[in-house]
Image (cartoon, rainbow, N blue to C red):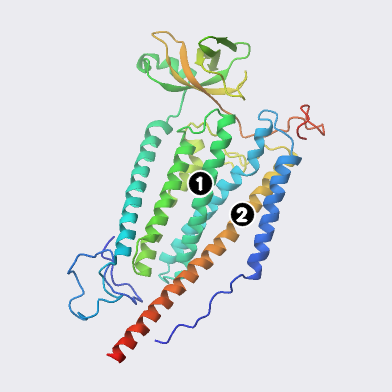
Amino acid sequence: MSTPARVLPQDRPAALRVLGATALVGVVATVWLGLFVTPPDQFMGNLVRLLYIHPPMAWVAFLAYGVATLASLLYLWPRTRAEHFDRLAGASAEVGVVFTGLTLVSGSIWGRPTWGAWWVWDPLLTTTALLFVLYLGYLALRRVPGEFHVRARRSAMAALIAFVDVPIVYFSVEWWRSLHQAPTVLNPTTHKTYVHGSMFWTLLLGFVSFTLVYIWLMAHRYRLARLQDLEDVEGLEVALEERRAEGDAG
Amino acid sequence: MTGVGTRTGDTFSPHDPLDDEPGSGEAGTAPSAPGRRSITLSPEQRRQRRRLEVVGVVIVVAIGFLVFKGLTSAIVFFKTANEAVAQRATLGNSTFQLEGMVMPGTVRTIRDSAGTTVAFVVESSGVKVAVTNTGSAPQLFQPGIPVIVVGHFVGTTDRFASDQILVKHSNSYIAAHPNRVRAQNGTTR
C-alpha cells in the first residue's frame, strides 16, 4: 500500500464562499425587514418580530435531521458503506442540534412576553427538548472510539431511531393539546398561511436565508470531517513509517 | 451492539476497541512492541472514554426525564373549563391547567397591600368558571382570548385559584395598522 495521495480538499471552494456571502446578505435583509420595515401585529405588537427567525430555525433543524436520516439510510441501505454518507449524516445532525438549540432559546425568549412563561411542559416543547437531547446523544455516540465502519453503522442506526421524534414534534400540536400554536407555514392540517403582506414575504425570506446558512455550515462541517479523517489516515501512515524505520534500525 | 468486529475493509484491529479488558486478545504476536495497534488504551483515551460514559449517563437520564414529562404533563396539557367542571369531584383540589376564553366585561384587577390579583371568568362550551389569579397578568392578557390558568379549585366550590396565566395565541399574524405608514405609537412602521 503506497502512501495516500496528499490531495487535500480545496481550502475554500469559491462556490462555498459565494453561498456564505448570499446567506449572510439574506439573514441581514431578514433582520432589517423584520425589525424596521414590517408592521407590528395587531395582537402581539412588536413581539411579532421574532416570527421572522424562530420558525425558520425550527425548519432548518427538521431539514438537517431529514438530511442526516437520508444519509444514514444511504450508508446502510445499498451496502456501499460509503464514508461520505456517514460524514454527511454527522455534519448535518451537528448543524441540526445547533439549530434545535437556537429554536428552543428563541422560542423561550418569545414565550416569556407572549405566553407569560419561559417554558411550559406542553407537547410541542417537550418533544422538541427530547429531540435536542436525542441528537446530542447521537453526536456523543459518534465520538465513541472505534473502527470507522463499526462506528458509522452504529451511528446510522441511532440516527434512524432519533428521527422517529421528528414527525412526533411536527404533529404534536395536532395530536395533543398544546399551548404552542400550530405552524403558520407548512401547517399539517390546513396548508394555509395566515400572515399579512410584507410579514409573509419577510418570513419567506427568513426561511430561504436560514436554509442557505444551513447548507453553508453543513458543507464546511463536512469538509472539516473529511480533513480530520485524512489526517487520521496520514497519522497512521506516519506511525507505520516510524515502526518500519525502527525495525530497519534494530 | 458490541462485538461487531469484522466488517469489510478493516485496516485496524478487528476487535472492538471498547473491549479493553487486560489480557483479552492480542495474544503474543508482538510482545516487544505495545505500539499503536495495541488494544490497551492510553491514559488520554481512558479519560476520553470516562468522559463519554458520563455524557452517556447524563443523556440517558435526560431522555428518561423528558419522556416522563411527556407522558405525565404533555399528553394532557390542559383541561377545558367544561371538562374540569364535569370532572370536579375527581379533580378535588389538585393542581392542573384549565383552559377557557376570557369573557369580556368580567376582568377586574385588584391591587392591595397583599399584591396584585386579577379576577375574571373563563368559558368553554358554555360552561363558566370564575378564576382568581394571584399576581399580575402577562402583557398580552385581554378579554376575548383563550388562556390557560395553572391552579386548583377552591374548597368544594367551582371557583378556581391560579398563580399563573398563560396566553394562547393563534398562528395568524395581521398587521396592526395595514393602511398606515406609521403606527400610532410612532416607534415603527
Q: Quadrant of the C terminus of chain A?
A: bottom left
Can you see residue B20?
A: yes
Pinpoint residue A189: horizontal percent, then vertical percent.
57, 39
Pinpoint residue B80: horizontal percent, then vertical percent.
48, 22
Name the kind of residue labelled 1 in the image: Gly
Q: Nearer the viewer, mark 1 or mark 2?
A: 1
Quarter assignment of residue B53: bottom left
Assign a secondary structure to mark 2: helix
What chain does badge 2 belong to?
A: A
Can you see residue A201?
A: no
**Residue nearest the viewer, comparing B113 with A214:** B113
**Residue nearest the viewer, comparing B157 with A138:** A138
* CA neighbours of label 2 inside 10 A, class few (<14), some (14 to 19), many (20+): many
Assign a secondary structure to mark 1: helix
- Of the two numbered discs 1 and 2 on the same chain, state the one appearing first in sequence: 1
Q: CA distance from mark 1 to mark 2?
A: 16 Å
Q: Are marks 1 and 2 on the same chain?
A: yes
State whether residue B97 is above or below residue A186. Answer: above
- In the picture as drawn, the residue positioned furthest to the front comes out as A249
* CA neighbours of label 1 inside 10 A, class few (<14), some (14 to 19), many (20+): many
**Which dot marks residue B20?**
none
Residue at x 58% of width, y 39% of height: A183
User: How many dots with numbers?
Assistant: 2
Pinpoint residue B59: horizontal percent, then vertical percent.
36, 48
The residue wearing badge 2 is A211
* Left or right side of B43 for B102: right
What chain does badge 1 belong to?
A: A
Name the kind of residue labelled 2 in the image: Thr
Pinpoint residue B162: horizontal percent, then vertical percent.
47, 17
* Left or right side of A198 for A238: left
The residue wearing badge 1 is A101
Residue at x 67% of width, y 44% of height: A203
